[in-house]
Image: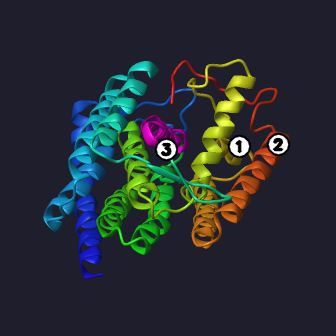
Amino acid sequence: MGDYLQVLITALVVSWLVTPLYCRLAWRLNVVDKPNARRLNKVPVPTGGGLVIIGAFWLAIWLSGAKHPALPGLALGSAIIGLIGWVDDRWELKPRLKFFGQILAATVVVANGTVIHFVTNPFGEMIYLGAWGIPLTILWIASVINMFNFIDGLDGLAAGVAVIACVPLFALAYQLDRGFVALLFVALAGSTLGFLRYNFSPASLFMGDTGAMFLGFMLGSLAVEGALKGATTVALAIPVAILGLPVLEITCSVMRRVRNGMPFYQADRGHLHHRLLDLGLSQRQAVLFMYGWALVFGSLGMRLANAPPALATGLVVAVLVLLLTLAGRWGWTGSRGSGHGQSKHSL
């Protein structure tokens, strides 16, 4: 465990110390998130701080001396997603170009060998995917990227949810004897936690799409390497459960926008965190409330990791269906006025 602790501390300290330096640089370069009808910040706040998370993460991994065949793909993919994210934070890219960058980053990882080869059959043996594993893995990684892009709406929300998700995903990778992936989860948690010191409400720096997309990219890719790749794996429902909060958020958002006649990528103010604010919670209270739900989902995933695949899959599907049904009754998946504050911008 000594190596894990060393990487955790290195990533955390580097992120903690470098974040204020990047904050000053962002002001000079005018990489600033300015208030508008959709955003919650009342004053300009520097953004693009995800670069610090990326840098601290990879520095900690490099100093650890870790070696693994998956490293080149993860490094190149994170460079692509970081560049696309930072350019979007600075100049705001068109949704199609941003989505192309996400697919490209995911494809690089898959081309390097990070592919879901098997899925657990809830009622029998493993199902070998063959060539179908390639598009499935790309779709999975791109989906998780956008999950974190969608929940990055309150100070510290995406960062905190990512740290919480790293804990059960680390435990799964460690349990499956995938020490390299476990090490990367530790580095990701440390680099994000150090940044969270400045990103929690009231935030002095936003991670922007740079950080949100990187967190989704790494969590999606590492979930494949640590829990879904190879014949010794867990049910796909387990990582879905661990990431249950962002899964619920993106599902509600897409359903709401489609039902309200909007493009699914067009931003609005109907997110779960906006609803909590409308109920009278402060930003900090809303974030802590969603942290609590992230912990519930993470605990559910861990509890079901060793359960029979049929039971695990059935329970996860039942929980998500129940929550989506309740969300529909509350108007979170599309109702009159649920898209108030619509914007021409995209998430």
Image quadrant in which you'd find residue 210: top left
Above-or-below relation of 204 to 96: below
Q: Position of residue 149 (x, y in %)?
A: 48, 39
What is the C-alpha distance between the residues marked 2 and 3?
38 Å
Mark 1 / mark 2, whichever is N-terminal:
1
Which residue is tagged 2? 330
The answer to which of 279 and 52 lies nearer the viewer is 52
Which residue is tagged 3? 129
Mark 2 / mark 3, whichever is N-terminal:
3
What is the C-alpha distance between the residues marked 1 and 2?
10 Å
For label 2, the crowd category at 10 Å Cα-Cα, with few meaning under 14, some 14 to 19 and many 20 or more, is: few
Say whether residue 135 is magenta: yes
| SS type, badge 3 | loop
Q: Can residue 23 be seen in this view?
A: no
Quarter of the figure that contains the N terminus: bottom left
| Left or right: 200, with 114 as reference point | right
Read off the magenta span.
129-152
For label 3, the crowd category at 10 Å Cα-Cα, with few meaning under 14, some 14 to 19 and many 20 or more, is: some
Which residue is tagged 1? 275
Q: Nearer the viewer, mark 2 or mark 3?
A: 3
| Left or right: 4, with 298 as reference point | left
